[in-house]
Image (spheres, rainbow, N blue to C red):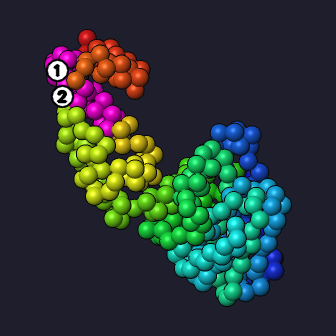
Amino acid sequence: MGNQQFHREKGVYGNSLMYFHTPSTAALEQLFYYNYCGLFYCNSLYCIRRADNEFYEPYLFIFVKEGCMYLDYKGRRYEANKNECLLFDCRLAHCYYAKRDTLFQFIHFGGNISDYYVQRICQNDQYAFTPSNPQDLSAALSRLLVYTGEPVPQEHMISAAIHQLLALCLAGSETHSSLNGQRVIKAVRYMTDHLAEPISLEDIAGQTGLNPSYFSRLFRRYTDTSPYDYLTNLRISHGKMLLITTSESVTSISEACGFGDPVQFTKIFKKKSGFTPLQFRRSHTSA
């Protein structure tokens, strides 16, 4: 399944490695998978150019260890230097190349929720980016090379490694140490500290100094949900804790969680958990 090749492509030095793989039907349907990956040492002669729909592999991820890679894609030129990345859809017209000696790791991958991750990581056409955790990314790619180099590649381990790689890219592109990340954290802390109060979107956005519309878009980018849904989930989680750790009535707990109406609390609780509050309490209470 995992087939190691020493590459002989133009501009690629002979000690470069590439691993080919034909994913199983189960991997294609359920997992992240790769078709080939490797480690290339190349020079200024290295250039790959493809037209729309000329290449069948979904996505290509490149991590530059030394040197520089360039990408011409969607009418723009992108550049990735040492410890930087390129990520793009290979089914669209593209050209990537080196102008000097360059060392890079790469993987052609797809499957599972690859589309979601690539859209999130590359939002606003950021197909070249600097991760906040380059050593972790490189280590994840190195683990992939180990898994793919096994006589019988373990597709679940490969899928987990690809998932980790994409999660690291997303975490690096949305680091909480950034100004916007700190704004989101401040908003969440405000929600947590005021769960029992009837706070509005304007109240939450006001803590960050942003207008509600821009804040909502920013918050969704970092959390995958709206401020309202996030607040609701915090309130329901707090309600679960109170149901299990106290003997307070549903009415009292609904008030403590910011729901003035216990009927509304029960309705939303069941929608979020699949149980009514009392059913949830009984299922977590020893006989």
- Front residue of 211 and 57: 211
Q: Which of the 4 image quarters holds residue 286?
A: top left
Give coordinates of residue 91: x percent, y percent: 76, 58
- Rounded to the nearest angstrom, the CA distance separating label 1 from label 2 is 6 Å
Whole-percent x, y for residue 265 in the image = 30, 22
Asked if the residue under mark 2 is in contact with the one under mark 1, i.e. CB atoms within 8 Å, the reply is: yes
**The label number, if any, that marks residue 256 in the structure image:** 2
User: Does the stretch in magenta take in 251?
Assistant: yes
Q: Where is residue 277 in the image (x, y as percent from the top left)?
A: 30, 18
Towards the viewer: 171 or 232:
232
Q: Is residue 137 left or right of residue 273?
A: right
Q: Is residue 2 visible?
A: no
**What is the crowding at mark 2: few (fewer than 14 residues within 10 Å), some, or many (at least 20)?**
some
Disc 1 is placed on an element classified as helix
Residue linked to disc 1: 252
Tell me if residue 209 comes above or below residue 128 in the rendering. Answer: above
Tell me the SS state at disc 2.
helix
Residue 56 bears which disc, if any?
none
Name the magenta segment's main secondary structure: helix
Which segment is the magenta one? 231-259
The answer to whether residue 243 is above or below residue 124 is above
**Magenta residue check for 192:** no
